[in-house]
Image: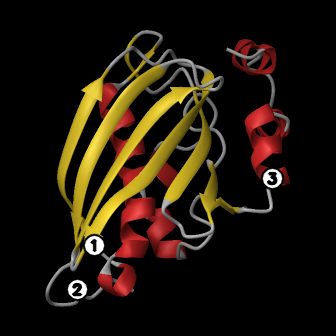
Amino acid sequence: MSPQAVEQEQQPGISEQEQIRLAEIERDNLDIVKKNRADPAIVEYEAYSHSSASEKKHSLTFSTLRGPGMIIVPPLMFYNKTYTELTSVLHLGENICGHDGIIHGGLAATILDEGLACVAVPALPNMFGFTANLNINYRKPIMSNQWVVMKAKLDKSEDRKAYVSAWIESLDGQTVFTEATSLYVSPKVPVKKPE
């Protein structure tokens, strides 16, 4: 847990906007963020920056789980130039736990599923698909109120299928908390998205 994050959690008098501003400053000063931003072979996105207002409004991780004590700021996403590998940096607060102080396993699965989609969908026809299979291995508890790194990669694609893998690890990369493999499938018939 970072000193600044501890301070934010212990001073409820700080406004939500100020907590978000402090979290953005802290995130932007993480070594992994600086390293990726300095690498010309990396493409940076803020999660949901290309999503429509409707997609954001109805997104579990953009709206419902967003804010102080949860996922305080949108994750940063760093892709390789072929969009087959992703490194994402996000903060997990203390109000998204299954057991006190331990991030809910379902949230870890959700984070992995979204990361897996980020490398699967670009490899699918029409850049659209669904999770057909998701396998999760929980290795170590993810303690709350810390920055974590989620990495994902495209393992193989064929026709309407993309096979992908991902994991959530500590900032220093020394501890793998949760791992996943998945199969994404693009529908045979285009699916109309809601407007």
Foreground residue among 115 and 72: 115
Q: How is the image coloured?
A: secondary structure
- Secondary structure under the numbered disc 3 in the rendered image: helix
- Amino acid carrying label 3: it is Arg
Q: Nearer the viewer, mark 2 or mark 3?
A: 3
Foreground residue among 74 and 11: 74
Foreground residue among 57 and 31: 31
Location of residue 66 by image quarter: top right
| Residue at numbered disc 3 | 37
Q: Mark 2 Cα within 10 Å, few/some/many (few <14, many 20+)?
A: few
- Mark number displayed over residue 129: 1
Sequence-earlier tag: 3 or 1: 3
Sequence-earlier tag: 2 or 3: 3
Using residue 151 as the reference point, say whether residue 140 is left or right of it. Answer: left
For the residues labelled 3 and 1, the Cα–Cα distance comes to: 29 Å
Which residue is painted at 60% across and 20% down in the image?
145
Q: Position of residue 180 (x, y in %)?
A: 30, 39
Tell me, yes or no, whether the two marked residues, 1 and 2, touch with CB atoms within 8 Å: no
| Residue at numbered disc 2 | 191
Using residue 32 as the reference point, say whether residue 188 is left or right of it. Answer: left
Foreground residue among 153 and 63: 153
Q: Position of residue 61 (x, y in %)?
A: 46, 49
Which residue is painted at 20% across and 40% down in the image?
135
Q: Position of residue 26 (x, y in %)?
A: 81, 32
For the residues labelled 1 and 2, the Cα–Cα distance comes to: 9 Å
- Amino acid carrying label 2: it is Val
Q: Position of residue 123 (x, y in %)?
A: 38, 74
- Secondary structure under the numbered disc 1 in the rendered image: loop
- Secondary structure under the numbered disc 2 in the rendered image: loop
Q: Mark 3 Cα within 10 Å, few/some/many (few <14, many 20+)?
A: some
